[in-house]
Image (tube, rainbow, N blue to C red):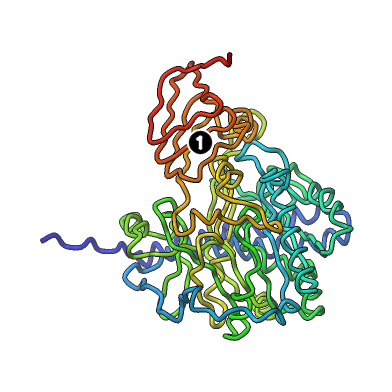
Amino acid sequence: MSATPKKHTKTQSTYAFDNTATTVAASQMRNALNNLADTVENPEALQRFENEMDSFFALFRRYLTDKASGTTLDWDKIKSPSPNEVVQYNSLKEANVNTNLSKLAVLKLNGGLGTSMGCVGPKSVIEVRDGNTFLDLSVRQIEHLNRKYDADVPLLLMNSFNTDADTAKIIKKYQGHRIRVKTFNQSRFPRIYKDSLLPVPESFDDELDSWYPPGHGDLFEALVQSGELDALLAQGREILFVSNGDNLGATVDTKILDHMIETGAEYIMELTNKTRADVKGGTLINYEGSVRLLEIAQVPNEHVEEFKSIKKFKYFNTNNLWINLRAIKKLVEQNAIEAEIIPNQKTISKGSSDINVLQLETAVGAAIRHFQGAHGVVVPRSRFLPVKTCSDLLLVKSDLFFLEHGALKLDPTREGFANPLIKLGSHFKKVSGFQQRVAHMPKILELDHLTITGNVTLGRGVTLKGTVIIVCNDGQKIDIPNGSILENVVVTGNLTILEH
């Protein structure tokens, strides 16, 4: 019988050394931030910048302390949430037509760029369906809600300094619509050199890649600093429904809204059943008696497979969140929100050399443990339809869905079935490459699995059923002819069929 390896505990001298190193690094950072503040000329900009640098410094100091004390979760204390900490959606009461909409505001996280899909500018302006962008669909959904219930639910967009200017131009087109769209910016924090732990920017107006938006955990601070939170409270708004700008399933659900008001919960996280495709998604756990979000980055290496298991952790976080506005205000004013820090390593070019930098980020879901009565609601998979890649784009553009008042609805024949698993290779990584090769959406109502790699083009009116695998060798080309029906087939090699 092998003995279980002992946890490595730090000696007193190691702690003393780490604490001294932490103090030195913190005071060097404080000096560097003060020097940065000296480069701001406009008094109004200075006030905002100093607030941001104070928030950044608090995050940085917490990062140093966590690193020195080696704070990780004790795996043995992680338990599955109790039944009252995770509620099933179908156990919620039917919605009350809708006295509670006057208490609601909707916020979309709009800080992301479309770079991973080869696009320039905010990701929210990628065309998704019938000429509509992500942003158009969000606006149409809320406009429909406001018309249907004679309500005035506002839409807020949290931008980053990367998406702010472009978004401001785009939202002008909604001025005549029955919706109020407000935007505000999340913080702009300095990237830090990985080796010296000092800030990359040398002045306030240093180039953009010296700065970063610090993840969506910055939402709480940014809402308060921008004045938007007080403005919402003044309008009688109590609850904020937050979701990722690229999740097309995140529509306002009045059943969850009513449930939140009835239970008095300050925070509700929508969870959905894990499939093999979601094994890395964060999950809700009970830790020392309170609800917490556990992300894969926090899991010790030897337990990663267990974390990915669908049996032990059945649900994952969709990042559709319902949060009480007064609770946010109170926690921010008390500096009480301490979400786990995610150190994100990046490489940037300075002159002719590549430099390793760190950006310290937090996630909005990790703050769940600070809110009273917080719990998860397990929602249907249809509320989680993110578009991260062109494989996702194929799914949401296909005949699997139809548009209704800006919301994507699943074709009834697919109800109860998992969405097909679609894997497109590197030729389809960018939206431009995808559009060129899939100019006409294939019919995929009976598809289970699709893999395409290499230089493959789909013709018009193609139908895919069952499992379809198309592999084109390097330097060759496969054109799937117009009107083809492919069912449970593997297509390989080189195929060009000319139209007669």
Q: Is residue 38 above or below residue 493?
A: below
Q: Nearer the viewer, residue 129 or 344?
A: 129
**Percent position of residue 421, x then y:** 45, 45
Quarter-of-image position of residue 77: bottom left
Determine the residue positioned at 59% across, 65% down.
320
Label 1 amino acid?
A: Thr
- Image quarter (top left, top right, bottom left or bottom right) of the C terminus: top right
Q: Is residue 1 above or below residue 150?
A: above
**Viewer-closest of 489 and 140:** 489
Left or right of 306 on screen, residue 99: right
Q: Is residue 103 visible?
A: yes
Q: Are there few (<14), some (14-19), or many (20+) residues within 10 Å of tag 1?
A: some
Location of mark 1 (residue): 463
Q: Quarter holding the N terminus?
A: bottom left
Find residue 267 and report its horizontal and vertical position in percent.
Answer: 58, 76
Asked if residue 68 can be seen in this view, the reply is no
Q: Residue at x 33, y 65 (%)?
A: 312
Residue 21, horizontal then vertical, whole percent: 51, 59
The answer to whether 347 appears left or right of 276 in the picture is right
The residue at the point 63 percent across, 31 percent down is 439
Give the percent coordinates (x, y) of residue 203: 76, 47
